[in-house]
Amino acid sequence: MELPIQYTEKMQKLLGEEYPRYLESFEESRYFGLRVNPLKLMPEVFLDQNVFSLTSVPWCNEGFYYAGDERPAKHPYYHAGLYYLQEPSAMSPGAILPIQPGERVLDVCAAPGGKSTQLGAGLQGEGLLVANDISAGRAKALLKNIELFGIRNAVVMSEPPERLKERLPNFFDKILIDAPCSGEGMFRKEPDMVKSWNEEMLAFCQKEQAKILEACAEMLRPGGMMLYSTCTFAVEENEKSIADFLERHQEFSLVPIEKKYGFSAGIGELSPCARLYPHKIKGEGHFLALMQKAGNSHDSLFSEEACEKEKDILPYLEFEKEVLKTKLSGTFKIFGDSLYLLPKGMPTMKGLRALRTGWQLGTLKKGRFEPSQAFAMGLFKEEVTSVEDFPLGDDRVIRYLKGETVEADGKEGWTLVCVDGFPLGWAKRQGGRLKNKYAVGWKWE
Ligand SMILES: C[S@@+](CC[C@H](N)C(=O)[O-])C[C@H]1O[C@@H](n2cnc3c(N)ncnc32)[C@H](O)[C@@H]1O
């Protein structure tokens, strides 16, 4: 691989005698990773199923390496949201930021959702995840991944952090800033990134990083924790960005990250931070800084959404009575023709660009309720009365995922189609056939 001379000179200076080992890492093949979705099944159960040849990623309980010739994205379990494909080092920020069920968590640069799905899983359905990305296009991919994972308590936004800050000061318990960066740590995995590397880009990223850090500092509650991560080695975007931030914000301090698994210390006074190098770990390059805001307070002021009246959601309630074994409780809200179940304690998002506000249950049109793909993915088989559960090897699984009508006798009406007990989507059964209601944009190709 041809690396820019300015880059190699900087790396040589940074790494000293380690530099030749770093260069050699380009001759080694990259690592492939997947992260199991604990909202659906536990990692050890997935491991026992021997679907792929897996070995554990040391820094992430749900993370595994798989062999490069395997194709986990072409497997029905992928479509059931049982795992997310993620570069192993990219699993470290979500593993290090400690998430407790019930917390309010912001992932401010979230698309396409690798870390958001990890944080959302950590909440175990309790609390609130706000997953935001400034790019509306990228936020669409983020939304799909959140839905695929079956996360019920997420809001997906596309706003500059400065706008979010005005509405949600001192609101979040935990914030992840997976900042836009020059991507030096990804050169082995994505060689094309080398072409866009230059000093101007680095300076631009540094400015963006400072702006994002500023906005997030205000959104974090006193006592809350914030993790800043990049996938670059550039000191300007890592230690310098954080040192400048700490200089401006005396109320923040660094929380040391343990240097296990081959992680290296941050440079100079920023040694509590961690650096991940491809010549020292089985993964690509990353930087992590964990910070805490002084004090301890939970008194943020915000207005909550009010619940719709029962008469306005009657078609849904009829559906619930007929198709579900459980009664969902919480704040039901109609936006446009979509019905949502909002996470507890969700502030109103009026005036902000939100792609999803909570669990989208379906649409209410002309007095009828039509369940959504997100609703199917967030349910458990045990919560539904009418289920068609195909074993993995049944050819109807792929046919269903391709959008075909498949044959299966059973109770007429709305049916949750599953593979090995894990929901894939909806169908409407009539005369021994399952009329396909799988999301059009999700079809198997
Ligand atoms: C490193 S990527 C995030 C990857 C993501 N966290 C994941 O794990 O899948 C950085 C993201 O930041 C977004 N971004 C860039 N500038 C931003 C800003 N000022 N505010 C919010 N997001 C921003 C980009 O669109 C990009 O999707």
Image (cartoon, rainbow, N blue to C red):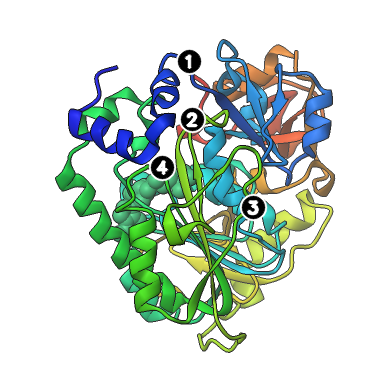
Q: Earlier in the sequence, mark 1 or mark 2?
A: 1
Does the residue at mark 1 contact the one at mark 3 (Cβ under 8 Å)? no
Does the residue at mark 4 contact the one at mark 2 (Cβ under 8 Å)? no
Of the residues shown, which amino acid type is indicated by label 1? Glu
Residue 372 is at least partly visible in this image: no
Q: Is residue 189 above or below residue 113?
A: above
Image location (x, y in percent) of residue 133: 38, 55
Q: Nearer the viewer, mark 4 or mark 3?
A: 3
Q: Which mark is residue 278?
A: 2
Label 1: few (<14), some (14–19) or many (≥20) C-alpha neighbours in 10 Å: few
Would you name the residue on which mark 1 appears? 28
Cα distance, mark 1 to mark 3?
Answer: 27 Å
Of the residues shown, which amino acid type is indicated by label 4? Cys
Q: Is residue 368 above or below residue 8?
A: below
Q: Which mark is residue 155?
A: none
Does the residue at mark 1 contact the one at mark 4 (Cβ under 8 Å)? no
Image location (x, y in percent) of residue 229: 45, 52
Would you name the residue on which mark 3 appears? 258
Image location (x, y in percent) of residue 334: 52, 67
Does the residue at mark 1 contact the one at mark 2 (Cβ under 8 Å)? yes
Q: Nearer the viewer, residue 183 or 233?
A: 233
Would you name the residue on which mark 4 appears? 231
> Which image quadrant: the N terminus?
top left
Residue 198 in the figure: left or right of residue 319: left
Task: Indicate yes or no: mark 4 CB to ligand 1 under 8 Å.
Answer: yes
Cα distance, mark 4 to mark 3?
Answer: 19 Å
Q: Determine the residue located farthest toward the left in the rendered image.
A: 200
Cα distance, mark 1 to mark 2?
Answer: 10 Å
Q: Nearer the viewer, mark 1 or mark 3?
A: 3
Residue 71 is at least partly visible in this image: yes
Q: Determine the residue located farthest toward the front in the rendered image.
A: 17
Question: Which residue is drawn at the image coordinates 69% and 41% (left, top)?
Answer: 37
